[in-house]
Image: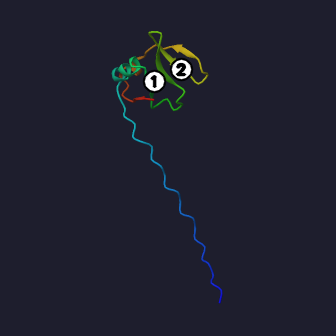
């Protein structure tokens, strides 16, 4: 007598959770930039937008690959959604 195999639906792959991101204020973010790190804001959805220190100047990297002088705004200063890349 032949055994019939029962097909099973594949189990969904478990979602890999991204590690929690620590949000910091602008002043803490500046300390990180001074240490050579890149910073971005959570509201900037494109991770090609980030701030760096370049030849003692605070610069903003944009998706076009160019660096621009960063004119810091009140929103930048008061933001608490800065993260280190």
Relative horizontal placement of residue 52, taking residue 78 as reference (left or right) = right
On the image, the x and y values in percent for residue 37 come to 43, 23
- Could you tell me how far apart the alpha carbons at marks 2 and 1 are, in whole angstroms? 10 Å
* Residue 26 image point, x, y percent: 37, 22
Where does label 1 land, which residue? Answer: 38
Q: Is the Cβ of the residue at disc 2 closer than 8 Å to that at disc 1?
A: yes
Name, please, the residue furthest toward the bottom. Answer: 1
- Which residue extends farthest top? 56
Closer to us: 9 or 78: 9
Q: Quadrant of the N terminus?
A: bottom right
Query: Which is closer to the viewer, label 2 or label 1?
Result: 1
Q: Mark 2 highlights which residue?
A: 61
Tell me: 7 left or right of 83. Answer: right
First in sequence, mark 2 or 1: give its number. 1
Residue 56 position by quadrant? top left
- Mark 1: give few (<14), some (14-19) or many (20+) Cα within 10 Å: many
Secondary structure beneath dot 1 equals loop
């Amino acid at each position: 007598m032949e055994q019939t195999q029962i097909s099973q639906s594949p189990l969904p792959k478990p979602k890999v959770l991204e590690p929690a991101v620590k949000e910091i204020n602008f002043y803490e973010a500046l300390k990180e930039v001074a240490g050579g790190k890149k910073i971005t804001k959570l509201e900037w959805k494109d991770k090609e937008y980030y701030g760096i220190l370049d030849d003692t100047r605070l610069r903003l990297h944009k998706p076009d690959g160019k660096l621009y002088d960063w004119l810091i705004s009140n929103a930048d200063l008061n933001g608490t959604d800065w993260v280190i890349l």
